[in-house]
């Protein structure tokens, strides 16, 4: 028996529970709509539960997916991952929330555990995509995850995971990050780290999500906005689609290896616009956001 | 002097003229809006003219782009194309039209000429993406291009180009073609064909576009529709975005090699929806469309 024995199963159970906790917290803050539940099975082995809320008071569309799958990778793809052989198991929770109001940021989080050839590793992260910059919101979101990271030093390396997030959620053709970032990490496991320690870290950052995001929703949900702000939101959602379909490895990997389409693409926004050559007026609130997307900010001022 | 001397220049001039002809015909059928004009230059050499119409009576958004660029390809990419060396020139016209009414199909066309290492070749095509199936429209669209092909046999091989179109405009993750097809061809040049003959063929199919598409617009533009049809249109436009960002080689190549972003992405629809797990009701007009996308039709019945 290896030290990771049972870890995958416990991780899977934790992610399933986290899905429920997050959906409950979001339904409470939404106040109007509940998450539906769609169980699905995967032909190659395993399955999942897609939970989707549409037409909420706060959430125009939100999806929180849990899955636990197993199967065989192509030899070519298997070589790119840790562990021997081609058999793998993967479990995780993944969410994208598209609020109705342009005053409330979009967010994404994902926590996952993979097992292959006796190796177990974790990956995940969370990031915030506002339509209008609120520096306090960005800093608070980062702080919630930095605190969870700090409790697990040196494993929980906020500075590294913050930089990794800015690098990952980047649209090269626009020269912009997707939003104001957060944290992103992958391949955390042996030999660099004790897998049990990584699991403890992932539990902690997973639990931090509701604490990081829900207060921002509560602070912004009743702020007024008009048609011009809504239009800007829909145009910015276009960037979200561009990132997910052009660059997001999770999305393209899922689509190209027979994942469940509706669970993968529930990340896409409900309503989106592409208008020709949209430019933010100099000095505007829109331009203020773009400036930050073009030059990521050290929100917590810990590296100044 | 090679036989292709001057061909690239003449092709470029033809495409520039075709852009003007198409825009004039579309502005006439729209009746309310005109195409704007944005000239742009490319850092690596050359440039183009983007012509965009937004907010028309018939066209919610339409873009007709002409370009003529030159530069150096990466050695890796250069190997995948005909002709020696890494220097290339490319010129062409490319259009996508997104009508406001779900009763009027979306369409795309592109005609291009490439030159590399003394080789010149042409590619292009046109395809129709209806939201509701009208068999007469699909057949008429195909017929216009089949007639142009037939005038240039054996080079103008409609059956081959029709099959190529169905194969190219296919979304593997949905198991659907993008629409009811049309024609698609590439790498038409020496030694299989006399380049001048190919140019004559491309002129003919290019000129066929207005004849193929405008009568459909005129036939459908005044048909009534309601919110449910509009919603279906926006959802189907989501598939258009999925194809363009996930699979279209022109789009991904352009974005990844420093093309002009706004000219490349002017193909994306103005307004789009992604709703969770949309299913067409059995026996509905929506289901009728999907059936044809899952099993391409021989519209002209020439191979029965």
Image (cartoon, coloured by chain):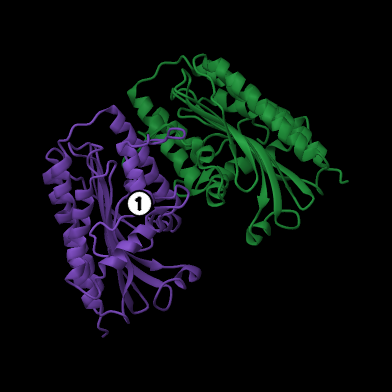
Chain colours: A green, B purple
Quarter location, residue B191: bottom left
Residue in the image at 41% along x and 36% along y: B279
Q: Is residue B89 visible?
A: yes
* Callout count: 1
Q: Which residue is mark 1?
A: B264
The front one of B267 and A38 is: A38
Disc 1, SS: helix
* For residue B43, above or below residue B150: above
Q: Is residue A111 visible?
A: no
The front one of A143 and B241 is: B241
Instruction: Residue A216 in the image: state x and y as whole percent.
Output: 56, 21
Query: In the orientation shown, which residue stands out farthest toward the right?
Result: A1
Instruction: From the viewer's perspective, tell me whether residue A163 is left or right of residue A248.
Output: right
The front one of B171 and A125 is: B171
- Chain to which mark 1 belongs: B
Instruction: Residue B117 in the image: state x and y as whole percent.
Output: 37, 78
Residue in the image at 47% along x and 73% along y: B79
* For residue B198, above or below residue B213: below
Quarter location, residue A214: top right
Instruction: Residue B10 in the image: state x and y as whole percent.
Output: 20, 71
| Disc 1 packing (10 Å; few <14; some 14–19; many ≥20) | many
């Amino acid at each position: 028996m290896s030290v990771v024995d049972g870890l995958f199963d416990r991780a899977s159970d934790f992610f399933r529970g986290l899905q429920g906790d997050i959906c409950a917290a979001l339904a409470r803050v939404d106040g109007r709509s509940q998450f539906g539940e769609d169980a699905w099975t995967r032909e190659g082995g395993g399955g999942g539960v897609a939970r989707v809320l549409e037409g909420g008071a706060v959430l125009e569309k939100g999806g929180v997916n849990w899955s636990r799958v197993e199967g065989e990778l192509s030899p070519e793809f298997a070589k790119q991952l840790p562990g021997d052989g081609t058999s793998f198991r993967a479990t995780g929770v993944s969410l994208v929330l598209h609020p109705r109001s342009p005053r409330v940021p979009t967010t994404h989080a994902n926590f996952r555990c993979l097992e292959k050839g006796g190796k177990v590793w974790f990956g995940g992260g969370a990031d915030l995509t506002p339509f209008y910059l609120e520096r306090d919101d960005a800093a608070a979101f980062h702080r919630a995850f930095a605190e969870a990271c700090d409790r697990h030093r040196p494993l929980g390396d906020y500075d590294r995971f913050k930089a990794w997030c800015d690098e990952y959620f980047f649209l090269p053709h626009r020269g912009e990050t997707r939003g104001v970032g957060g944290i992103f990490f992958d391949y955390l496991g042996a030999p660099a780290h004790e897998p049990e320690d990584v699991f403890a870290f992932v539990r902690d950052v997973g639990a931090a999500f509701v604490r990081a995001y829900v207060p921002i929703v509560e602070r912004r949900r009743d702020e007024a906005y008009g048609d011009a702000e809504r239009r800007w939101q829909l145009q910015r959602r276009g960037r979200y689609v561009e990132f997910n379909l052009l660059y997001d490895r999770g999305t393209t990997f899922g689509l190209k290896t027979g994942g469940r389409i509706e669970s993968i693409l529930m990340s896409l926004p409900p309503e989106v616009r592409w208008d020709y050559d949209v430019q933010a007026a100099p000095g505007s609130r829109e331009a203020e956001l773009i400036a930050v997307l073009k030059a990521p900010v050290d929100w917590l001022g810990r590296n100044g």
